Amino acid sequence: MSIDLIGFILVAAATLVLSVMMVLSKEIVHSALYFAGLLIGIALIFFLLNAVYVGIIQILIYVGAVVVLILFGIMLTRRDILLG
């Protein structure tokens, strides 16, 4: 097995685990952080596939903007509204 293939398998497995943890997490902040890790894992897969531009865009737009926006939305929402 090549080192690139082993790295790809490890990153893909970590991304899969993060996606399952994101869905099964009870805390919404933890789900958002798992989502950030998931998007970073996807960017790493793009880097391993030599799609560097797409990986950089993935990090800048999705991890840098969308996840931060989601976290700010969660932090600005009162907890009693979320619990119903």
Image (cartoon, rainbow, N blue to C red):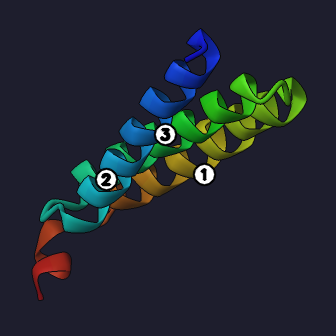
Residue at 42 percent across and 50 percent down: it is: 35
Q: Is residue 64 left or right of residue 69?
A: right
For the residues bearing labels 1 and 2, Cβ distance under 8 angstroms: no
Q: Which residue is mark 3?
A: 12
Residue at 43 percent across and 60 percent down: it is: 73
Q: Which residue is mark 2?
A: 75
* Above or below for 40 versus 19: above
The extreme bottom residue here reads 84
Q: Amino acid at mark 1?
A: Val
Q: Nearer the viewer, mark 1 or mark 3?
A: 3
Observer-nearest of 23 and 45 = 45
Instruction: Estimate the x, y position of residue 34 in percent, counting from the top left.
Output: 34, 46
- Label whose residue precedes the other's in the sequence (3 or 2): 3
Label placed on residue 53 = none
Q: Is residue 60 left or right of residue 11?
A: right
Q: Which residue is mark 1?
A: 66
Instruction: Estimate the x, y position of residue 17 in percent, counting from the top left.
Output: 31, 47
- Label whose residue precedes the other's in the sequence (1 or 2): 1
Which quarter of the rendered picture does the N terminus lie within?
top right
Q: Is residue 12 left or right of residue 79?
A: right
In 3D space, how far apart are the residues under numbered discs 1 and 3 (Cα atoms)? 22 Å
Residue at 39 percent across and 40 percent down: it is: 13
Observer-nearest of 59 and 67 = 59
In 3D space, how far apart are the residues under numbered discs 1 and 2 (Cα atoms)? 14 Å
Tell me if mark 2 has few (under 14), some (14-19) or many (20+) residues whose alpha carbon lies within 10 angstroms of its own. Answer: few
The extreme front residue here reads 1
Q: Amino acid at mark 3?
A: Ala
Instruction: Estimate the x, y position of residue 10 in percent, counting from the top left.
Output: 43, 28
Q: Is residue 83 left or right of residue 72?
A: left
